[in-house]
Image (spheres, rainbow, N blue to C red):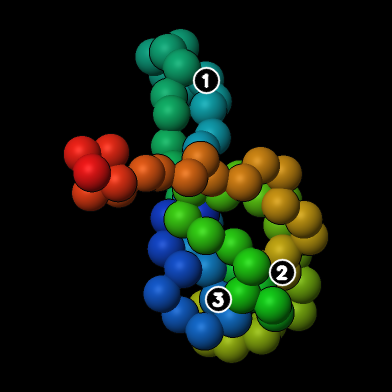
Amino acid sequence: MKGRVVSDKMDKTVVVEVDRKFMHTTFKKVVRTTTKYKVHDEKNECKVGDVILMVETRPLSKDKRWRLLEIVKKAEAIESEATVQG
């Protein structure tokens, strides 16, 4: 599954948001839903904004059932306003 990292505050764990689109059964409209998963990141290499590939694995903790497979796209580096002004 592919998703975007929304939090990297925990040690060896990141929170990943996965978007999913599907057709509503009654109203026949496209519905977009997001789900958050806790993913095991052994080397703490993911940052907020990264797009990653994750794979399901055995339960690693109470909420963590996913493991980082690879980082598809790194987040863009944001320049601070202090360096721009100075």
Q: What residue lies at 71% left-to-right and 57% top-to-bottom?
A: 54
Q: Position of residue 43 (x, y in %)?
A: 69, 77
On screen, residue 85 above or below 52: above
Q: What residue lies at 48% left-to-right and 64% top-to-bottom?
A: 15
* Residue matched to label 1: 23
Q: Is residue 64 visible?
A: no
On screen, residue 8 above or below 54: below
Type of residue at label 3?
A: Thr
Q: Position of residue 2 (x, y in %)?
A: 66, 44
Quadrant containing the C terminus is top left
What is the number of the mark on residue 13?
A: 3
Type of residue at label 2?
A: Arg
Q: What residue lies at 59% left-to-right and 62% top-to-bottom?
A: 46
- The alpha-carbon separation of the residues under discs 2 and 1 comes to 29 Å
- The alpha-carbon separation of the residues under discs 2 and 3 comes to 9 Å
Q: Position of residue 12 (x, y in %)?
A: 59, 81
- The alpha-carbon separation of the residues under discs 1 and 3 comes to 32 Å
In the foreground, 82 or 22? 82
Q: Earlier in the sequence, mark 1 or mark 3?
A: 3
